[in-house]
Structure formats: C-alpha cells, structure tokens
Image (tube, grey):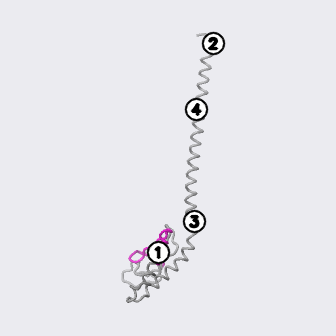
C-alpha cells in the first residue's frame, strides 16, 4: 500500500468517525426536540382542561342563584292540591320545571343523592336527627336538594338523618 492510499484510508476513517459523531449529535437533538414537543402538547392539554374548569366553576355562582328558582318551583308544586294537579297551568309549571332541570343538567349540574344514602359531610348537611336505637347515619328526608358540578359541591344537601 502506498503512502497516498494510507493517507486516504486515515482520512476516510477520520471522516467516518466524524460522521458517526454528527449522527449521534443529531439523534440527541432529535430526542430533545421530541421531548420538548411532547411536553408542549401535554401543557396545551392541561391549559385546555384548566380553561374548561375555570369556565365551569365561574358559572357556579350564577347556577347557585338559579337553584333558588328551582327550589321555588318545587315548593309551588308541592303545595298544589291533589284535585288541581291535572289542570293545564299546573302541567305547564311542571313542564317549565323540567326544562329548567334539563338546562342545569346540560350545564353539568347533578343533584346529590340523599334519601336512603349514608350521610357524607362532604355532600350533606344534617339539619336534624331522628332518635333511633341503632343510629346508622342514614338519610331519611331531604329538606333542601344539594347539587354538584363534577366532584365540586356547589350546594350541600340539607337532610334529616336517623
């Protein structure tokens, strides 16, 4: 092998080593970019969820005020005498109450389960207790309905327990 060939081989070997180093560097940068992109996309998803949560819970004050109207509908319908329950105006009030409940449901508002359930201070407020030989903290009556949006209680249910 001549001196020229040896120099070419050394040059080729050197270039191959440099090429390998550059490939490794490019791979390192690509992986870093992929991680950064994944982090960015995850953060975008988190921001979207946070924004949705802020909107949902910023409406909770308004919804809480609207619940008073729903309570009024319930009290109104509870006081209608049996002989008038088939009247058209009573049926109209029932229909309006149903529309109102559907509106709240579409806003993510759910009624908290009460009667027959175990008392849970995160969801219920006991306003009275019926004396019992075997107190089990079971809800026997609902004084005022409670509501939640997702897992966030916007109004605790007022209940009577046994």
Is 119 drawn above or below residue 76 in the view shown?
above
- What is the CA distance from the residue labelled 3 to the residue labelled 4? 48 Å
| Viewer-nearest of discs 3 and 1 | 1
Badge 2 or badge 1: first in the primary sequence: 2
View extreme (front): residue: 88
View extreme (left): residue: 133
- The tag on residue 55 is 3
Quick one: 150 or 7, which is closer to the camera?
A: 150
| Viewer-nearest of discs 2 and 1 | 1
**Label 2 sits on residue:** 4
| Viewer-nearest of discs 4 and 1 | 1
Image position, residue 142 (x, y; %): 44, 80
**Label 1 sits on residue:** 99
Q: Which residues are magenta?
A: 96-125
- Are there few (<14), some (14-19), or many (20+) residues within 10 Å of tag 4? few
- What is the CA distance from the residue labelled 2 to the residue labelled 3? 75 Å
In terms of secondary structure, where does tag 3 sit?
A: helix
**Label 4 sits on residue:** 23
Residue at 55% of width from left, 64% of height from top? 53
Residue at 57% of width from left, 65% of height from top? 55
In terms of secondary structure, where does tag 2 sit?
A: helix
- What is the CA distance from the residue labelled 3 to the residue labelled 1? 22 Å
Does the magenta-highlighted stretch encompass residue 119? Answer: yes
Image position, residue 115 (x, y; %): 40, 78
In terms of secondary structure, where does tag 4 sit?
A: helix
């Amino acid at each position: 092998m001549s001196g020229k060939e040896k120099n070419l081989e050394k040059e080729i070997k050197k270039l191959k080593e440099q090429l390998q180093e550059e490939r490794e560097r490019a791979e390192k940068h690509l992986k870093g970019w992929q991680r950064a992109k994944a982090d960015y996309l995850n953060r975008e998803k988190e921001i979207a969820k946070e924004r949705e949560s802020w909107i949902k819970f910023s409406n909770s004050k308004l919804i809480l005020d609207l619940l008073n109207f729903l309570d009024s509908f319930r009290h109104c319908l509870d006081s209608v005498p049996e002989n008038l329950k088939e009247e058209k105006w009573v049926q109209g009030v029932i229909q309006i109450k149903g529309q109102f409940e559907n509106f709240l449901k579409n806003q993510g508002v759910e009624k908290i389960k009460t009667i027959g359930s175990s008392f849970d201070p995160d969801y219920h407020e006991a306003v009275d207790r019926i004396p019992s030989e075997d107190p089990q903290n079971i809800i026997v009556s609902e004084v005022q309905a409670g509501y939640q949006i997702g897992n966030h209680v916007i109004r605790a249910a007022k209940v009577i327990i046994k």
